[in-house]
Image: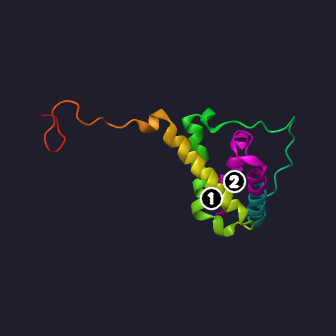
Amino acid sequence: MLREAHDAADTLISERFRSYLPGRMLLMLLGKFRDDVAESLGMELPPLPRRSGPVKVVKLDDLTSSELGTLSGAVLILVTRFTALMDDPLLPELLREFRDALFIEQADRPESRTRPEVGRGRHDSLGEEA
């Protein structure tokens, strides 16, 4: 169970996704949470990252649908199952705000708005082609 919390936090702060996180505070708190969970699992802490420069902020609409799904899934795991384990009360709040932003981004995408059209062709009362 804790391994899932670790993996979700690790996904969010990975080099691939860190640029999409809003602000520096969420990144810092997620890193601390991931390290705390790793320590409680007896895992070795990862080496300190070596970056060539500051993290470039990127808009959520630059995410592919797959990446958006990955981020949303990781945030949802943490928000719905692991907030009780978070020492800092700001972390669940920031995660919920980020979850909301991800949901809005998903809803704004054209593929999320495509639904089967009603009224095309003739249908009987059960919706079957007549």
Could you say which is closer to the camera, residue 128 or residue 23?
23
The label on residue 78 is 1
Q: Secondary structure at mark 1?
A: helix
Q: Are marks 2 and 1 in contact (CB under 8 Å)?
A: yes
Q: Give, as a three-letter code, the residue at label 1.
A: Leu
Q: Residue 44, percent across and down?
A: 81, 57
| Helix, strand or loop: magenta stretch | helix
Distance from Cα at disc 2 to Cα at disc 1: 8 Å
Residue in view at x 15 percent, y 32 percent: 122
Please tell me whether residue 42 is drawn above or below residue 52 in the rendered image.
below
Q: Image quarter for residue 55?
A: top right
Residue 54 covered by magenta stretch: no
Which quadrant: the C terminus?
top left
- Chain-order first, disc 2 or disc 1: 2
Estimate how packed mark 1 is, as few (under 14), some (14 to 19) or many (20 or more) residues with alpha carbons within 10 Å: many
Please tell me whether residue 108 is drawn above or below residue 76 in the rendered image.
above
Q: Residue 63, percent across and down?
A: 61, 35
Q: Which residues are magenta?
A: 2-30
The label on residue 9 is 2
Q: Give, as a three-letter code, the residue at label 2.
A: Ala
